[in-house]
Image (cartoon, rainbow, N blue to C red):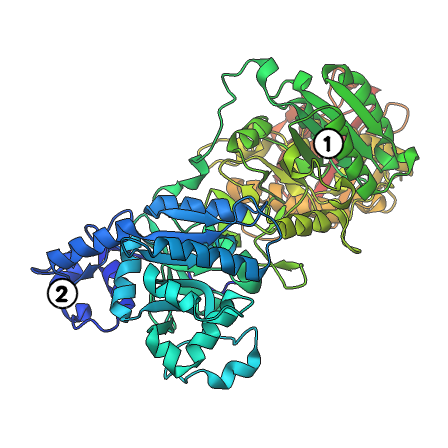
Amino acid sequence: MLLSVTVVLVGIAGLVSASLPAAMDTNYDVDEDPELLNSGLLPGVHCVQGVPRGEDLNKYCRQISPQKLLRMNKTAENMVVLTVWRPGSDSHTRFLRSAKVYGYKVKTLAEGEENLSDKQLLQLLKDEVKALSKGEDKLILYTESVDAMFSASPVRVVEEFEKSLAGILVSADGFCWPDRTLESSYPRVARGKRFLNSGGFVGLASTVHKMLSESLEEVSLQLLMTHVYVKDSTRHKYKLKIDHLSKLFQNLNGATGDVELRFAGKEAYLQNTLYNTVPVVVRGNNHTNLVLHTLGSYLARSWNPEDGCRSCWENMIDIEEKVEEELPKVTLAIFVEKATPFMEEFLEKIDDMEYPPSRMDLFIHNAAEYHEKMINEWVEEIGEDFASVKLLKHSDNIKEWHARKAALDYCVEQDCQYLFSVDSVAHIDNPYTLKLLIEQNRNVVAPMMIRPYKAWSNFWGAITHDGFYARSMDYMEIVQNNRRGLWNVPYISSCYLFRRSVFDGQKVQSLFIRNILDPDMAFCENLREKGIFMYVSNRVDFGHLVSADKFDTSRLYNELWEVFENRWDWEERYVHPNYTSALAENTTLEMPCPDVYWFPLFKERYAREMIETFEGYGIWSDGSNNHRYRNGPPQINIESVGLDAVWQEILTKWVSPIAMKIFKGYSRFPPRALMKFMVRYKPDEQPFLRPHHDTSTYTINVALNQPGVDYKGGGCRFVRYNCSVTDSRVGWVLMHPGRLTHLHEGLPTTEGTRYIIVTFVDP
């Protein structure tokens, strides 16, 4: 079930007005008292545990006498929380953390015991409550830690319980279960949830003991409390009341649309907007546990807009001062499941990781024949640095899930402590990524990665009932880094670190298998079923994803075409590092001749690959299809090699902004170019071009090789100014007006071969 919430920030006044409705029977109208709204205080009005704004959102004001406040604090101090522990579940740890944050005393039943039936759990609860009922009559609160957490202090529990005038106050549910035939037996209510949910209740130990002793036949706590409640005599006998308006307990099942996540100062809280209440115990019962995971990243002082992520700092380990031999041993598992663009950079970043290779065992599965040569050479070059290496080649014909199982086996064989799984689409830009993930000290944690300029990431904030993608209420805030922290999510992929304890001793072969699901989805569903939390961290920038979905490997230099699918990587590989400086407002571009401007656009690698791509195409024309360059030097239209759309994108994203900077008042956008081609000058073909005007508003001329090295002579002379540019720079652009003022000629190339790309912009 998806969480439909709105995140709201409130200040002091907003905190008071938002919290007061939790006690609907107060005779104090805070909204009509401007002094209280402004200060949060009035004579004779006390605030639970202090002032309205502070660590605890629920330090809200009430008309409470000092004596009553003292008594409530004492009751809260003596209150005992009873809960049930489910083996292997991270939810219990989260529950205990929330209890510690607010100062609850917790006693866990059935700790260390597995597969207890509902009847056995009921008996354990009966025995514990019986023991607590002897001596001082303590207030007890029961809930199941697997799907619950606290979001406010024990004093709030005491206050809401006392205000209810109940002997036992039990949480409300919108559904009658497990016996729907009892639905008609429930008293009708004018407002609120009608039915009972035994997953959360509070009462004095003596009263609860008597109620639990009402029947020896019941097979579950839910049925026992239901039968007590639906009978008028027993309901009144024990003053058993349902928390219809969720003043104390919020069951999320069937009610996710009723709640909003809000912030007051440094406190996150859950507001029930349907009943205008602020519940204390939040339960992700039934299928809403994933919603609770999302809320758990904020509640119990985990995250707030002022401090950011506070829970991120908890339980961390420091490995910075450890000597190399003491560092955790990691199996680095690389999976190349399909042809992937920018693999060269991917491998370079793996090699640059700031973690001793001697503490890493390298496992590689390469299922892409396209990368066979590159990966084999890379392993041969760096393999000796690692503690050990295992390479599964394309020719081994191993399926992905088999390969991932093999990585787990290899990890165990090498006595690893962690497995760091990295798919070829995940570029680790931050060399400290592995260290930071280990120090985070979680069972499973992924560094957040996105496809640059897109909302596509390596995690899902929510999932549908059938396990597929759904957008959580905070997804965009996280992927845009408006919120940084550590987030409990239902799905991760592409790059993640997990402890050996997650899979060691388990049926390893099943970790990546579940029905017909892909290995990544099977992995996550299996972890969810085991109750193992998956975290994604965006505390710092770790890296990014490339898109391999449409990667065409049929060309000589396939990445030249990746400007649309992988623009960020394309820029990193091909765009000159000084281009942005040329575009800066306070930068003056070089002007070697009047109104002829010079700026860097491409790296030398781009120029070299373009030359080889066009020479590989090989069909050079004599200019007969170009009336301006007729009888000119050999040329190939950019359309002919399939780069027309790519070149148009280059003109739009990189060339046009410079043109609008240079030629003030010129703002035609996007630019239009009908004539765009590569020109080749050679002494034995045509070494020069006679004076001419271009059919363009402005022309760009991109130098692709180096004068004095690749050729001699050459250059461009502007006749009217008798000014020549002969010292061309590889990847740099000459930009000049095309008509009237800038008659120009191509100077003779005397040795070698000169290559340029010419484009007539806005004819």
Please give the residue where the numbered disc 2 appears in the rendered image.
Answer: 34
- Percent x, y for residue 463? 61, 58
Relative to residue 173, is residue 701 drawn left or right?
right
Q: What crowding class fits label 1: few (fewer than 14 Cα within 10 Å), some (14-19), or many (20 or more)?
A: many
**Residue type, mark 2 in image:** Pro
Most foreground residue, 754 or 481: 481
Say if 382 sits above or below 690 in the image. above
Dot 1: element = strand
Q: Report how far apart the C-alphas of labels 2 and 1 lie in the structure.
A: 62 Å
For residue 352, which quarter of the picture?
top right
Residue at figure coordinates x 82%, y 34% from the top left: 366
Q: Nearer the viewer, residue 581 or 363?
A: 363
Residue 500 placement, left or right of 191: right
State which quadrant residue 548 falls in: top right
Question: Quick check: 443 above or below 205?
Answer: above
Sooner in the amino-acid sequence: mark 2 or mark 1: 2
- Identify the residue at image location x=72%, y=50%: 522
**Residue type beneath disc 1:** Ala
Q: Residue furthest left?
A: 43
Q: Which residue is mark 1?
A: 333
* Residue 496 screen position, x and y as percent: 64, 38
Contact, mark 2 vs mark 1 (Cβ under 8 Å): no
Residue 25 tag number: none
